[in-house]
Image (cartoon, rainbow, N blue to C red):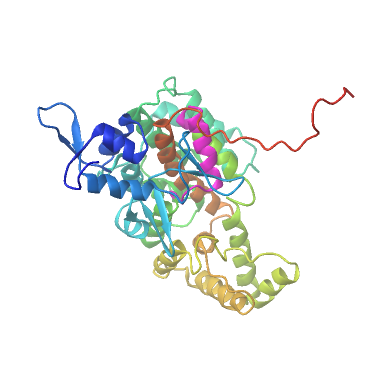
C-alpha cells in the first residue's frame, strides 16, 4: 500500500483510475494531472492526492465492470467520463464552473480548453476554402424546407467526403477536424443577415445565418454565452449516441453526424422551437394566460419549463436571462417568458429551463423558430468531440449492452 506522501508510478495511477497507462498520459496532456520525472529519469510519478481527486470526479454510484462501463438500474449503463459534473443547481466542465467559464471565455476558447486543457486567447476556428465550397454546395442542394439539422448533417457528410485523412484518430488530428467542422457549420448555412469576415468568431458568423437583424454586441455576446453553456450536459441521448459511434472507431465527422441524428428527435433538439412559437403566441395575444390555459386543457407540457436534473431554475437559463436583460429589444420577450413561468407556477411547480431562454433570444432577434435547435447543435458539436476523444482512449467496442430477449422460445417451426 502506498503512503499518502509517496508518489505513484504510472502503473499505480492507472490502476487507481481504472484506465490504461496511455490514458494517464492523455490526462497529463489535457491538464487533468501533473507528472514529475521519477528518480533516475525513467518514467513519471504522480501526486496521490491529485490522482485520488481525479478518481472521485470520474466515479459513479456503481462499481465499474471490466469493460469500462458501469451497470446501474436494469436497462441503463453509466459511463466513466471526466467532462461534465452536474451537482444540484450547478454544473461543471472538467471541474470548472460552466457558468463562470461561459462568462469569461468565448465559445472557441472554451471548446478548445475542453479538448486540450489549454486556453488560447483570440483563438479562431477556420476551414479551408475548398472545404467550405463543398459544404456550402451541399447545403444549397437541399430543398428550402430542409430543417437546420438536415443542413448540418449535409455539412458534416460533405466535410467528411472532402477530407481524405478523416480516419486519422490521433488527438491532434481530431482537434483540427473539430475546429474546421465547427467553422464549416457556422460558415455554410444560408446567409440571413450582414456579411462578416471569414475569420470572425463563431457566434458572429452564426448570427448572420440566423437573423437579418444587426449584430448588436450584447445580443451576439448572449449567443456566444449560450454556445458555451450548451457545449455539454453529461450523457444526454445525442452524446451517448456519439460515444457509441466513437467506441466503434467512427471518424469525428461520423461521430458528429450520429449526434445530430439523435438530436433530430422531437424530445431532444426541438424543445426550444416549441418554446419560441409559444412566446410568439403570447406576444400576439398580449397575455400568457390564454396560451398557458390552452396547453393545460390539451394536456400538453408547457414548453421551456422544468428539467429533471435541476429542482429549481436551470442555471443556464438564469445566466442567459441576466444577459438578455441587457439586450435592446429583448424586453417584451423576456416579460412574456416571465409571465409564462408565473402563471404556470400556480398549477405546477416548474421553473424555466435553457430552452425558454433560447426562445427569448431567438424571438427577440427575429430568428426563425428552429434557430435554437441550430445553436444547440453547433454548440454540442464541441461536446461530442470531447466525448469522442475520451472514447478513443478506451477499449474499442466496449459500449455494447446485452439484449434482454422477450420473443418466443426457440426452436420455432418455420412459417
Viewer-side residue, 175 vs 373? 175
| Rendered position, 394 above or below 283 | above
Q: Residue at x 30, y 53 (%)?
A: 105
Q: Quadrant of the N terminus?
A: top left
Q: Residue at x 55, y 40 (%)?
A: 260
- In the image, residue 183 lies at what x, y percent? 41, 38
| Farthest right residue in view | 415
Left or right relative to 221: residue 192: right
- In the image, residue 281 lies at what x, y percent? 65, 68
- The magenta span reads 231-254
Q: Quadrant of the C terminus?
A: top right
| Farthest bottom residue in view | 346
**In which quarter of the view is residue 363 placed?**
bottom right
Viewer-side residue, 211 vs 408? 408
Q: Residue at x 36, y 36 (%)?
A: 126
Q: Say how many tags the image has.
A: 0
Q: Is residue 246 shown in magenta?
A: yes
| Farthest left residue in view | 40
- In the image, residue 152 lies at what x, y percent? 53, 39
Viewer-side residue, 66 vs 389? 66
Q: Is residue 170 shown in magenta?
A: no
- In the image, residue 238 lies at what x, y percent? 54, 43
Does residue 185 appear in the picture of this structure? yes
| Farthest top residue in view | 164
| Rendered position, 306 above or below 257 | below
Does residue 135 appear in the picture of this structure? no
| Rendered position, 261 above or below 274 | above
Amino acid at each position: 500500500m502506498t503512503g499518502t506522501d509517496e508518489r505513484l508510478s504510472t502503473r499505480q495511477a492507472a490502476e487507481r483510475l481504472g484506465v490504461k497507462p496511455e490514458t494517464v498520459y492523455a490526462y497529463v496532456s489535457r491538464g487533468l494531472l501533473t507528472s514529475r520525472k521519477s528518480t533516475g529519469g525513467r518514467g513519471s510519478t504522480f501526486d496521490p492526492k491529485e490522482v485520488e481527486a481525479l478518481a472521485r470526479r470520474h466515479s459513479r454510484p456503481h462499481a465499474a465492470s471490466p469493460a469500462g462501463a458501469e451497470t446501474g438500474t436494469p436497462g441503463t449503463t453509466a459511463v466513466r467520463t471526466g467532462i461534465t459534473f452536474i451537482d444540484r443547481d450547478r454544473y461543471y466542465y472538467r471541474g470548472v464552473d460552466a457558468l463562470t467559464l461561459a462568462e469569461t471565455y468565448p465559445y472557441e476558447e472554451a471548446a478548445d480548453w475542453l479538448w486540450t486543457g489549454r486556453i488560447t486567447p483570440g483563438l479562431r476556428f477556420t476551414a479551408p476554402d475548398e472545404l467550405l465550397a463543398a459544404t456550402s454546395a451541399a447545403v444549397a442542394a437541399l430543398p428550402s424546407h430542409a430543417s437546420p439539422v438536415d443542413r448540418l448533417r449535409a455539412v458534416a457528410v460533405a466535410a467528411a467526403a472532402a477530407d481524405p485523412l478523416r480516419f486519422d484518430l490521433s488527438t491532434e488530428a481530431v482537434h483540427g477536424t473539430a475546429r474546421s467542422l465547427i467553422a464549416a457549420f457556422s460558415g455554410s448555412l444560408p446567409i440571413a443577415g450582414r456579411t462578416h469576415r471569414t475569420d470572425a468568431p463563431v457566434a458572429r458568423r452564426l448570427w448572420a445565418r440566423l437573423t437579418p437583424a444587426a449584430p448588436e454586441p450584447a445580443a451576439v455576446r448572449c449567443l456566444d454565452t449560450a454556445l458555451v453553456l450548451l457545449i455539454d450536459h453529461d450523457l444526454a441521448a445525442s452524446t451517448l449516441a456519439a460515444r457509441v459511434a466513437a467506441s466503434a472507431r467512427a471518424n469525428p465527422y461520423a461521430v458528429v453526424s450520429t449526434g445530430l441524428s439523435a438530436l433530430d428527435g422531437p424530445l431532444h433538439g426541438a424543445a426550444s422551437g416549441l418554446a419560441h412559437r409559444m412566446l410568439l403566441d403570447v406576444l400576439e395575444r398580449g397575455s400568457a394566460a390564454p396560451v398557458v390555459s390552452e396547453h393545460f386543457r390539451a394536456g400538453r407540457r408547457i414548453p421551456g419549463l422544468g428539467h429533471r436534473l435541476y429542482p429549481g431554475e436551470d442555471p443556464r437559463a438564469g445566466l442567459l436571462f441576466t444577459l438578455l436583460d441587457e439586450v435592446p429589444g429583448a424586453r417584451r420577450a423576456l416579460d412574456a417568458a416571465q409571465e409564462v413561468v408565473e402563471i404556470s407556477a400556480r398549477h405546477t411547480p416548474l421553473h424555466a429551463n435553457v430552452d425558454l431562454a433560447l426562445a427569448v433570444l431567438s424571438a427577440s432577434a427575429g430568428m426563425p423558430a428552429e434557430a435554437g435547435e441550430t445553436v444547440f447543435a453547433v454548440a454540442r458539436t464541441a461536446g461530442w468531440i470531447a466525448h469522442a476523444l475520451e472514447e478513443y482512449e478506451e477499449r474499442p467496442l466496449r459500449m455494447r449492452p446485452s439484449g434482454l430477449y422477450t420473443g418466443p422460445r426457440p426452436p420455432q417451426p418455420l412459417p
